[in-house]
Image: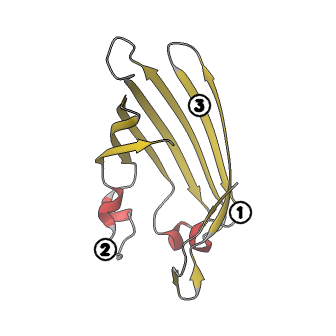
Amino acid sequence: MIYYAYPGAKVGGVHYDYLELAGKLGYDFGFFTATAGLNYSGDYFFKTGTGVYVSGDVSVPLPKFPFDMGIGLHVGHQWIENNARFGTPDYTDWSIGVSGKIEGFTISLQYVDTSIDGAACFPGSGLTSTCDARGVLSVSRTF
């Protein structure tokens, strides 16, 4: 269970907060790991009705490379009951990336994109570029 809280964020008296149920199943095949996920919200972001997200991920370790490197592939699809209120049509997202571990830090570089074209991405909001393809560099550390 995940609760998304956006303190003070609201438009026309409608808050962004919502509750989501999420589950994943995965299996390590040795030379790759596969994971399938399902997220469900009966009252999705900004009161847009039912939201369902299904996803699949594959992670392939690269043992001959330094730093515990690996390749990750992801694809997911989001269904939203009230697309007009949300601001986009239902969409598919995908990514491909590489990651590695250095001195306890995980560094990853990904290419991410969606099936939403610019005209259908939050039209009139000034946020149309948020659906564009892009590169994402992240650095994380678990304590």
Secondary structure under tag 3 reads strand
The amino acid type found where label 1 is placed reads: Gly
Is disc 2 surrounded by few (<14), some (14 to 19) or many (20+) residues within 10 Å?
few
The amino acid type found where label 3 is placed reads: Thr
Q: Residue at x 32, y 16 (%)?
A: 65
Q: Indicate which disc residue 28 carries.
A: none
Precedes in sequence: disc 2 or disc 3: 3
Nearest the viewer among 9 and 56 is: 9
The image position of residue 121, as x and y in percent, is 38, 63
The N terminus: image quadrant: bottom right
Q: Nearer the viewer, mark 1 or mark 3?
A: 3
The image quadrant of residue 54 is top right
Q: Indicate which disc residue 42 carries.
A: 1
Secondary structure under tag 1 reads loop
Precedes in sequence: disc 1 or disc 3: 3
The image position of residue 21, as x and y in percent, is 70, 53
Q: Report if the CB atoms under discs 1 and 2 are less than 8 Å apart.
A: no
Q: Residue at x 36, y 43 (%)?
A: 139
Vertically, is 48 above or below 52?
A: below
Horizontal side, residue 84 vs residue 66: left or right: right
The amino acid type found where label 2 is placed reads: Gly
Q: Residue at x 30, y 49 (%)?
A: 133
The image position of residue 142, as x and y in percent, is 49, 41
Is disc 1 surrounded by few (<14), some (14 to 19) or many (20+) residues within 10 Å?
some
Precedes in sequence: disc 1 or disc 2: 1
Q: Indicate which disc residue 126 carries.
A: 2
Nearest the viewer among 81 and 105 is: 105
